Image (tube, rainbow, N blue to C red):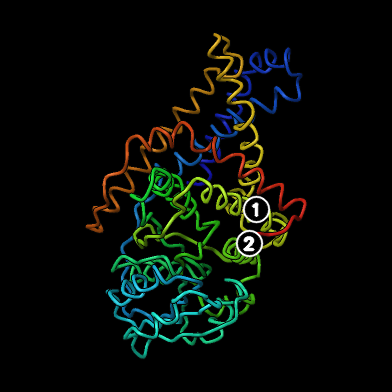
């Protein structure tokens, strides 16, 4: 499947280059050959290549073999908490409702909360399987590592304090991890938006999580190369976590951890039916800050983990990792040349918005359709119904979402490259 997806995508890329040589020459008359190649490459050729690769990977996906474990292994859930008074009770209650036969132990690590989180927890009837660690405020990575020291089970799950789990979430994520090959040491859960109805910004992110993030993890999981086992909900083999020293103290501790695992020759996958709901930013300012942090995290991970040059990294993971290198250049092209192309188009000049650009949009829409079908099929199997999403938000998501976030992503990339002060 990987070989076929790659070959067909490269055939598309080569054909597109030859067909659009005249387009490159036309643009070069105004901007020179360096910029013309950059524009065509990153607003049409590379996005088209990525879309087609994802599309074929998802369409060619083999049917999963039904496997059943005789035993559901004991697991410890680590919940790092900082000022989570409004959400922590719902998170704990969702864990208590899990339909899982193995023992589920919970360690809540309070990272020096200054609100009423601790007081609320102590007033609840938590039970003997839930323990609380009280720490000074030193960050999420430190809290997770302190919690990891107390884990005695073979498997560890991390859950954010604002995340709630579907009743089958633990069973499904553990089923995926336990039935994977021996090299698989981490499984990412499936995140959807919990506070989608709060604002138009959260409605936009609802589409991002159900189409963008879900789709990316779905195709990467097919190759056992999920590039981010997110801290909000993922499962790990405890022994391996302890061997690599847990989480590093950085902006994107979950990205760095995942890349460390991949660089050592391990594999990671995705449990599409292990559903959790997480809170997302409710204002544009907070969303921009989050995406700036995510972008910075990717550059930070490249600096901390020599993953591209790792001899242990398998070829599939290395290929998917290389695609990440293009994102800063695509974001820059989106920010500058797409608006310029639209302005020229308004005056009847199709210099920057050619037929190939329209083809890329078509591939993107087709990819969204395939992802949506797979998501709906999964939810039907789970007998899980989500509220109807906003059509207006979908239109904005398709037309403007990537463009309006591109500046924040670029700031994040540059901030990490020049080592500016980190902000969480």
In terms of depth relative to the viewer, which is nearer, 345 or 377? 345
Q: Is residue 323 above or below residue 195?
A: above
Quarter holding residue 260: bottom right
Q: Is residue 298 above or below residue 200?
A: below
In the image, what residue occupies the spot 53% across and 47% down? 285
In the image, what residue occupies the spot 73% across and 18% down? 31
Task: Provide residue 251's location: percent of width, then percent of height.
Answer: 63, 62
Label 1 packing within 10 angstroms: few (<14), some (14-19), many (20+): many
In the picture, the quarter occupied by the C terminus is bottom right
Give the number of callouts: 2
Instruction: Name, please, the residue furthest toward the left.
Output: 383
Label 2 packing within 10 angstroms: few (<14), some (14-19), many (20+): many
In the image, what residue occupies the spot 31% across and 43% down? 389
Task: Provide residue 123's location: percent of width, then percent of height.
Answer: 35, 85
Do the numbered discs 2 and 1 sit on residues whose CB atoms are within 8 Å? yes
C-alpha span from label 2 to label 1: 8 Å
Q: Which residue is mark 2?
A: 251
In terms of depth relative to the viewer, which is nearer, 68 or 374? 374
Q: In the image, is 30 to the left or to the right of 344?
A: right
Identify the element where label 2 is drawn: loop
Instruction: Name, please, the residue furthest toward the front.
Output: 115
Q: Which residue is mark 1?
A: 296
Q: Which mark sits nearer the N-terminus, 2 or 1?
A: 2
Task: Provide residue 51's location: percent of width, then percent of height.
Answer: 50, 36
Identify the element where label 1 is drawn: helix
In terms of depth relative to the viewer, which is nearer, 371 or 267? 371
Q: In the image, is 293 to the left or to the right of 87?
A: right
């Amino acid at each position: 499947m990987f070989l076929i997806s790659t070959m067909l995508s490269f055939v598309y890329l080569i054909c597109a280059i030859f067909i659009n040589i005249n387009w490159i020459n036309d643009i070069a008359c105004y901007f020179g050959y360096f910029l013309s190649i950059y524009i065509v490459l990153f607003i049409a050729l590379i996005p088209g290549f990525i879309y087609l690769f994802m599309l074929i990977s998802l369409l060619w996906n083999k049917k999963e073999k039904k496997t059943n474990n005789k035993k559901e292994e004991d697991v410890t859930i680590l919940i790092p908490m900082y000022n989570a008074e409004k959400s922590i009770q719902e998170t704990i209650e969702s864990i208590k409702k899990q339909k899982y036969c193995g023992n589920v132990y919970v360690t809540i690590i309070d990272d020096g909360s200054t609100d009423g989180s601790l007081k609320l927890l102590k007033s609840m009837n938590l039970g003997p399987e839930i323990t609380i660690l009280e720490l000074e405020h030193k960050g999420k990575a430190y809290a997770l590592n302190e919690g990891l020291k107390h884990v005695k089970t073979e498997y560890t799950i991390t859950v954010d304090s604002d995340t709630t789990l579907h009743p089958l979430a633990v069973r499904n994520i553990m089923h995926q991890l336990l039935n994977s090959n021996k090299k698989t040491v981490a499984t990412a859960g499936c995140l959807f938006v919990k506070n989608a109805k709060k604002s138009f910004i959260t409605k936009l992110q609802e589409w991002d999580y159900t189409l963008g993030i879900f789709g990316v993890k779905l195709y990467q999981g097919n190759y056992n190369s999920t590039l981010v086992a997110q801290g909000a909900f993922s499962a790990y083999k405890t022994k391996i976590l302890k061997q690599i020293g847990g989480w590093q103290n950085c902006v994107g501790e979950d990205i760095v951890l995942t890349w460390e695992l991949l660089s050592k020759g391990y594999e990671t996958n995705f449990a599409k039916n292990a559903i959790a709901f997480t809170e997302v930013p409710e204002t544009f300012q907070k969303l921009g800050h989050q995406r700036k942090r995510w972008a910075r995290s990717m550059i930070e991970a490249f600096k901390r983990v020599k993953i591209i040059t790792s001899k242990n990294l398998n070829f599939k993971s290395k290929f998917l990792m290389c695609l990440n290198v293009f994102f800063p250049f695509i974001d820059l092209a989106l920010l500058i040349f797409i608006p310029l192309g639209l302005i020229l188009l308004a005056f009847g000049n199709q210099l920057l918005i050619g037929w190939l650009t329209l083809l890329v949009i078509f591939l993107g829409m087709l990819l969204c359709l395939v992802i949506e079908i797979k998501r709906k099929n999964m939810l039907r199997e789970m007998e899980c119904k989500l509220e109807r999403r906003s059509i207006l938000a979908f239109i904005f998501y398709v037309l403007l979402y990537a463009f309006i976030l591109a500046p924040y992503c670029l700031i994040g990339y540059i901030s990490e490259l020049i080592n500016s002060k980190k902000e969480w």
